[in-house]
Image (cartoon, helix red, strand yellow):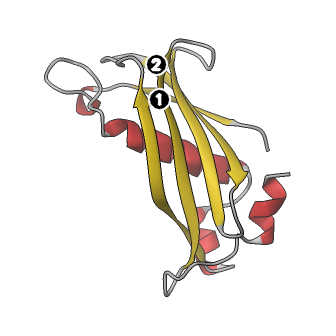
Amino acid sequence: MSACHLSVRVYWEDTDAGGVVYYANYLKFLERARSEWLRACGHAQTALALDPGVLFAVSEVNIRYHRPARLDDLLVVSCQPQQDGAGVLLFNQQVHRDSEHGELLVSASVRVVCVDATGFRPRRLPPEILEELR
Protein backbone atom coordinates (compact mmCIF):
# COMPACT_ATOMS: atom_id res chain seq x y z
CA MET A 1 0.00 0.00 0.00
CA SER A 2 1.19 3.49 -0.73
CA ALA A 3 1.52 6.21 1.85
CA CYS A 4 -1.47 7.03 3.99
CA HIS A 5 -2.42 10.68 4.51
CA LEU A 6 -4.46 11.99 7.43
CA SER A 7 -5.81 15.53 7.79
CA VAL A 8 -5.69 17.00 11.29
CA ARG A 9 -6.92 20.40 12.45
CA VAL A 10 -4.97 22.15 15.23
CA TYR A 11 -7.18 22.99 18.23
CA TRP A 12 -6.52 24.92 21.45
CA GLU A 13 -5.81 21.67 23.29
CA ASP A 14 -2.90 20.99 20.89
CA THR A 15 -1.11 24.28 21.54
CA ASP A 16 0.96 25.97 24.19
CA ALA A 17 0.25 29.43 25.61
CA GLY A 18 1.59 31.05 22.43
CA GLY A 19 -0.79 29.18 20.13
CA VAL A 20 1.99 26.95 18.76
CA VAL A 21 1.56 23.15 18.66
CA TYR A 22 3.25 21.67 21.72
CA TYR A 23 6.14 19.50 20.50
CA ALA A 24 4.93 16.24 22.11
CA ASN A 25 1.52 16.52 20.43
CA TYR A 26 3.12 15.75 17.06
CA LEU A 27 3.65 12.21 18.40
CA LYS A 28 -0.13 11.89 18.74
CA PHE A 29 -0.63 13.05 15.16
CA LEU A 30 1.96 10.54 13.92
CA GLU A 31 0.29 7.74 15.92
CA ARG A 32 -3.10 8.53 14.41
CA ALA A 33 -1.69 8.32 10.88
CA ARG A 34 -0.14 4.90 11.60
CA SER A 35 -3.44 3.68 13.02
CA GLU A 36 -5.31 4.96 9.98
CA TRP A 37 -2.82 3.20 7.69
CA LEU A 38 -3.71 -0.10 9.39
CA ARG A 39 -7.42 0.72 9.16
CA ALA A 40 -7.10 1.60 5.45
CA CYS A 41 -5.49 -1.82 4.94
CA GLY A 42 -8.56 -3.39 6.55
CA HIS A 43 -6.98 -4.20 9.91
CA ALA A 44 -8.43 -2.85 13.13
CA GLN A 45 -5.93 -2.98 15.96
CA THR A 46 -8.49 -4.57 18.27
CA ALA A 47 -9.06 -7.37 15.73
CA LEU A 48 -5.30 -7.95 15.30
CA ALA A 49 -4.98 -8.28 19.08
CA LEU A 50 -7.50 -11.13 19.00
CA ASP A 51 -6.43 -12.89 15.81
CA PRO A 52 -3.51 -13.34 15.11
CA GLY A 53 -2.88 -12.06 18.64
CA VAL A 54 -0.43 -9.23 17.99
CA LEU A 55 0.05 -5.65 19.09
CA PHE A 56 2.43 -2.99 17.86
CA ALA A 57 4.71 -1.05 20.20
CA VAL A 58 6.88 1.95 19.37
CA SER A 59 10.52 1.16 20.13
CA GLU A 60 12.21 4.23 18.69
CA VAL A 61 11.34 7.69 17.41
CA ASN A 62 13.61 10.11 15.59
CA ILE A 63 11.85 13.41 14.99
CA ARG A 64 12.91 16.71 13.49
CA TYR A 65 10.92 19.90 13.89
CA HIS A 66 11.34 22.15 10.83
CA ARG A 67 8.64 24.81 11.35
CA PRO A 68 5.88 25.36 13.92
CA ALA A 69 2.21 24.60 13.37
CA ARG A 70 -0.25 27.03 14.89
CA LEU A 71 -3.81 27.18 16.13
CA ASP A 72 -6.38 26.47 13.36
CA ASP A 73 -3.78 25.16 10.89
CA LEU A 74 -4.82 22.21 8.77
CA LEU A 75 -2.08 19.57 8.87
CA VAL A 76 -1.59 16.58 6.61
CA VAL A 77 0.23 13.72 8.31
CA SER A 78 1.77 11.11 6.02
CA CYS A 79 2.77 7.59 6.86
CA GLN A 80 4.96 5.38 4.64
CA PRO A 81 5.69 1.92 6.12
CA GLN A 82 8.45 -0.51 5.22
CA GLN A 83 9.57 -3.79 6.72
CA ASP A 84 12.71 -3.51 8.84
CA GLY A 85 13.22 -7.08 10.05
CA ALA A 86 11.01 -10.09 10.73
CA GLY A 87 8.98 -8.32 13.38
CA VAL A 88 9.65 -4.64 12.77
CA LEU A 89 8.03 -1.88 10.73
CA LEU A 90 9.76 1.40 10.03
CA PHE A 91 7.41 4.31 9.32
CA ASN A 92 8.73 7.36 7.54
CA GLN A 93 6.35 10.14 8.46
CA GLN A 94 5.92 13.81 7.71
CA VAL A 95 3.63 16.61 8.77
CA HIS A 96 2.86 19.31 6.19
CA ARG A 97 0.76 22.46 6.42
CA ASP A 98 -2.41 22.57 4.26
CA SER A 99 -1.65 19.65 1.89
CA GLU A 100 0.71 16.73 1.40
CA HIS A 101 2.84 19.08 -0.74
CA GLY A 102 2.59 22.05 1.61
CA GLU A 103 5.25 23.45 3.90
CA LEU A 104 7.14 20.68 5.72
CA LEU A 105 6.74 21.09 9.47
CA VAL A 106 7.94 17.79 10.93
CA SER A 107 9.77 14.71 9.64
CA ALA A 108 10.05 11.53 11.69
CA SER A 109 11.17 7.95 11.56
CA VAL A 110 9.19 5.66 13.88
CA ARG A 111 10.28 2.07 14.57
CA VAL A 112 7.42 -0.20 15.62
CA VAL A 113 7.85 -3.78 16.86
CA CYS A 114 5.29 -6.55 16.64
CA VAL A 115 4.64 -8.25 19.99
CA ASP A 116 2.43 -11.02 21.32
CA ALA A 117 -0.82 -9.55 22.66
CA THR A 118 -0.68 -11.54 25.90
CA GLY A 119 3.00 -11.80 26.84
CA PHE A 120 4.42 -8.80 24.96
CA ARG A 121 7.21 -10.95 23.53
CA PRO A 122 8.55 -10.15 20.05
CA ARG A 123 6.65 -11.78 17.16
CA ARG A 124 7.07 -11.97 13.42
CA LEU A 125 4.85 -9.67 11.40
CA PRO A 126 1.63 -11.46 10.41
CA PRO A 127 1.30 -12.41 6.72
CA GLU A 128 -1.66 -10.05 6.29
CA ILE A 129 0.52 -7.09 7.31
CA LEU A 130 3.42 -8.24 5.12
CA GLU A 131 1.02 -8.41 2.19
CA GLU A 132 0.24 -4.70 2.61
CA LEU A 133 3.93 -3.82 2.25
CA ARG A 134 4.24 -5.33 -1.25
3D distance between C-alphas at marks 1 and 2: 6 Å
- 69 sits left or right of 8 in the view: left
Mark 1: amino acid: Val
Residue 74 disc label: 2
Q: Residue at x 63, y 63 (%)?
A: 88
Q: Residue at x 28, y 32 (%)?
A: 14
- 110 sits left or right of 85 in the view: left
Residue 4: image location, x then y, percent: 67, 37
- 53 sits left or right of 66 in the view: right
The one of 15 and 82 positioned closer to us in this rendering:
82
Residue 98: image location, x then y, percent: 52, 14
Q: Quadrant of residue 55?
A: bottom right
The one of 66 and 116 positioned closer to us in this rendering:
66
- 16 sits left or right of 90 in the view: left
Residue bearing mark 1: 8
Q: Residue at x 36, y 19 (%)?
A: 69
Question: Nearer the N terminus, badge 1 or badge 2?
Answer: 1
Residue 38: image location, x then y, percent: 65, 53
Question: In terms of secondary structure, where does tag 2 sit?
Answer: strand
Question: In terms of secondary structure, where does tag 1 sit?
Answer: strand
Mark 2: amino acid: Leu
Q: Which quadrant holds the N terminus?
A: top right
Q: In the figure, 32 relative to 49: above or below?
A: above
Residue 21 disc label: none
Residue 77: image location, x then y, percent: 54, 31
Q: Residue at x 75, y 62 (%)?
A: 129
